[in-house]
Image (cartoon, rainbow, N blue to C red):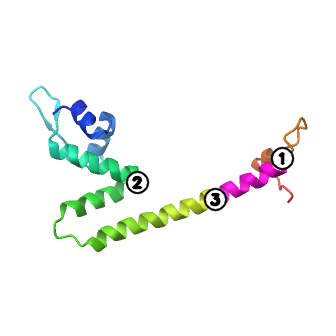
Amino acid sequence: MKIGDAAKQSGVPAKTIRYYESVGLIEAATRQDNGYRDYSETDVHTLRFISRARGLGFTVKDVAMLLALYRDSSRASADVKAVAARHVDRIDEKIAELQSMRQTLLHLIDRCHGDDRPDCPILADLAGARVSA
């Protein structure tokens, strides 16, 4: 099937499919006599797998590792679990970072009068000035 059909069936845009080929997540498609890429049902299944993993926030490197594990029938599920656990650790770090950002912004919003005066602790903080508690 052509790339447009593979894109429709997998839910992955054609541009992204070409990117996944370029970084080795999927094998380069065979070419038809007219030069068009030719994708199989297996390719579409792989694209759906990649899309789901990327949707869960896995990096391209992690997706490649998960694909390799998926294709390896002698894999240990502990290896898959370890990849997922490392990803959860990164998510937890990001959540903590976002919560810290939120608290900082709430603190600054609380100190801003929000009126006609020009002084604004939010802008002062962004400019590097110390904002009093």
Instruction: Report the front residue among 94 and 26.
Output: 94
On screen, residue 66 versus residue 92, left or right, reads: left
Q: What residue do we see at 56% from left, 60% from top?
A: 95
Does the segment drawn in magenta span residue 108? yes
Q: Position of residue 94 (x, y in %)?
A: 55, 59
Mark earlier in primary sequence (2, 3): 2
Residue behind mark 2: 56
Q: In which quarter of the image is residue 80?
A: bottom left
Q: Label 2: how many residues lie within 10 Å, few (<14), some (14-19) or many (20+)?
A: few
- In the picture, the quarter occupied by the C terminus is bottom right
For label 3, the crowd category at 10 Å Cα-Cα, with few meaning under 14, some 14 to 19 and many 20 or more, is few
The stretch of residues the image draws in magenta is 100-111
Residue 24: where, in percent of width, then height? Answer: 26, 49
Depth check: 2 or 126 in front?
Answer: 2
Q: Which residue is at a point 8% across and 28% down the rendered structure image?
A: 33
Q: As shown in the figure, which amino acid type bears the numbered disc 3?
A: Gln
Gap between marks 2 and 3 measured at Cα: 20 Å
Measured in 3D between alpha carbons, the distance from the residue under mark 1 to the one under mark 2, in whole angstroms, is 37 Å
Q: Nearer the viewer, residue 34 or 133?
A: 133
| Mark seen at residue 112 | 1
Q: Residue at coordinates 40% horizontally, 54% vertically from top-left?
A: 56
Q: Name the residue under label 3.
A: 99
Secondary structure, mark 2, is loop
